[in-house]
Image (cartoon, grey):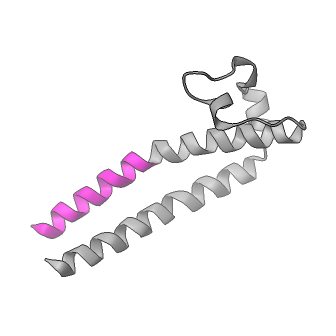
Amino acid sequence: MEKQKGEATLLGACIKLTPQVWYNHKVTAATTFWRSKDERVTKRDIVGEFRDPEKALKLEDYMSVSTMSIRFYIVAKLPLHYLELSIVFLGCTHLG
């Protein structure tokens, strides 16, 4: 019973992390794009209540950032989150 509950919690945590990974990459892609144009931007310029509309990336701008780096970022982050949470939950089951 506890193993099923732990697995469900782990799955839920990973599902919650997936949009966060995309959000983080949105910021990473935008800062990389503007850095290539010799402009400095902050996270606040890109997202949030006071974002600068002129700093929003158009689709072609976003795609001009190396799609390979985007793939590496996504492919690296999701399994690492899953592994980290798996280790935490494995440790917790031994405590009970």
* Residue 42 position within the rendered picture, expressed as x and y whole percent measured from the top left: 70, 37
- The quarter of the rendered structure image containing the N terminus is bottom left
Seen as rendered, the residue at the extreme top is 53
26 left or right of 36? left
Magenta stretch: residue 15 in it?
Answer: yes
Query: In the image, what residue occupies the spot 53% across and 48% down?
Result: 21
Residue beneath the point at 68% across and 49% down: 70
> Going 34% across and 53% down the picture, which residue do you hit?
13
Quadrant of residue 33 in the image? top right
- 80 left or right, relative to 38: left
Q: From the image, which quarter does the C terminus lie in? A: bottom left
Toward the left, the furthest residue is 1
- Report the label total: 0
Which one is in front, 35 or 8?
Answer: 35
Determine the residue positioned at 75% across, 36% down: 63
Instruction: Indicate the quadrant where residue 73 lies.
Output: bottom right
Q: Is residue 19 magenta?
A: no
Above or below, comparing residue 30 to residue 81 in the picture: above
- Residue 40 coordinates in the image, percent (x, y): 81, 37
Pick the front one: 78 or 40: 40
Instruction: Decide whether the magenta segment is chiefly helix, strand or loop.
Output: helix
Which range of residues does the magenta coloring cover? 1-17
Asked if residue 95 is positioned above or below residue 82 in the image, the reply reads below
Find residue 65 and report its horizontal and vertical position in percent: 78, 42
- Percent across and percent down for residue 64 are 81, 38
Using residue 73 as the reference point, say whether residue 86 is left or right of it. left
The answer to which image quadrant residue 37 occupies is top right
Q: Residue furthest right?
A: 38
Q: Which residue is at the front of the view, 56 or 72? A: 56
